[in-house]
Amino acid sequence: MEHLLFAAYLIFFAWLVTKTKFFTASGLNSPQLVIVFLLKVMAGILYGWIGVHYELLAQMGDTWGYHYNSLQEYHVLLTNPKIFFTDIFHNSYEDGYTRFLATENSWWNDLKGNIMTKLLALFDVFSFGNYYINVIFYSFISLFGPLAFYRVMKDVFPSRKLPILLAIFLVPSVLYWTSGLHKDGLVFFAFCWIVYQIYFGLKNRFTGRRILAIFLGLLLVLVMRNFLIIPLLPALFAWVLADRLRKKPLLVFCAVYALFVLLFFTAKFINPRLNFPEGVVERQEAFLKLGGGSAVAVNKLAPTFTSFLVNAPQAFALSTIRPYPSDVHHLLSLAASLEINFLLLLFLLFLWRHKKIKAFDSFLLFCVFFSFSVLMMIGYSVDVLGAIVRYRSIVLSFLIVPMVAQTDWDKIGRLFFLNGEKD
């Protein structure tokens, strides 16, 4: 019976993606929409399967933990809906709602898991508690994110549709981590949704509906990964300001980020609760205590500007180019290492043969500044390579897609084709 229900839902949602206006407006035809949807479903199923068979190796127990907790919440929903929708606001911690960046004893830290559990409980109403049917629902919702980003990038690079499509949907870690039943798919969706609304708001106009959509996107980031609001807001502000000023956008970004860094380290003198460096240090300490099979040795961070500056190269290397080949100890780490080296090869091809680079376009500057600020935050706070691969997946597209779109693949193809003819 479960298999029949799975097949019925899969067919229904495969049909629905071809009828959803937001999806069809992307310019992709029906077979293409069905293919990208099925890619996400298959990745989500693989995610769950690995979570069962390689839970400790892949450090993926959370996805099934959310599922089992959602079954309990599903029972609460059926027996006492009022409690289901209100107990999320209950706070038993002494510090109330103030420990915004804390990794333990914090309502904010618990919120993301509680939201995820309740979302799956709502899915359970229609799936009767089947994990893999929930994957179908989640794939449909999270598909709005990459297709929103595709619509933006297609508008920026109208002649590069195929490379953009492939770069968005075929980077393995991005597809895998944003398709599984976990928070990452919703965070990536929120990022792409915000970018979509702001990009077309700047190009056309900001309507009340668009502003509401941006607010809801920011709210989703806040509840699912609250600390990512810190690098997101200055990047968005710099993007909008640079677009409005229309002069020297790189200078605008540098000025905004200089002010951001200043506030990051000095806000604690205005209010001790705004000790952002201490929040990053606490996150690193939490990961160091957690350990893990792919944990690597790192320098301990201190909540000072000097410590952050000294550890910047380590943070950059951790989040952008690892795992190294020497970090490979099993099949999963091999896959991650092969991917990052392949992406580095794409970067070299981009440097070797690229079209005219829109280096100082305000949107592309947003992609670069935002991505690297998130990557640096990951590098400063996380020492587990498996977690790093997962966390960076939500911003990789903002670097890879513009790079692939500006690479002259025709020239590269002709060079290899001519060399092949000479041989």
Image (cartoon, rainbow, N blue to C red):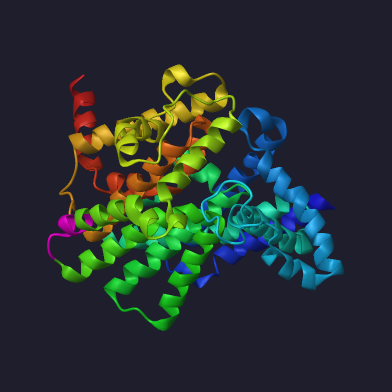
Q: Residue at x 48, y 30 (%)?
A: 336
Q: Which secondary structure dominates the residues rendered in magenta?
A: helix
Image-based side of 191 in relation to 91, left or right: left
- Give residue 64's position: percent from left, percent from top: 72, 44
Which residue is pictured at 40% across the width and 43% down the height?
377
Q: Position of residue 313 (x, y in %)?
A: 31, 31
**For the view shown, which residue lies furthest in the left direction?**
247
Q: Residue at x 40, y 51 (%)?
A: 165
What is the residue that sits farthest to the bottom in this orientation?
208
Q: Does the segment drawn in magenta span residue 237?
A: no
Magenta span: 247-253
Q: Against 112, is 288 above or below?
A: above
Q: Residue at x 17, y 46 (%)?
A: 355
Direction from residue 13 to residue 82 in the image, left or right: right
Residue 416 position by quadrant: top left
Q: Position of residue 408 (x, y in %)?
A: 22, 43
Residue 265: x and y in percent read 34, 49
Q: Among all residues in the image, which is located at the extreme right?
A: 79
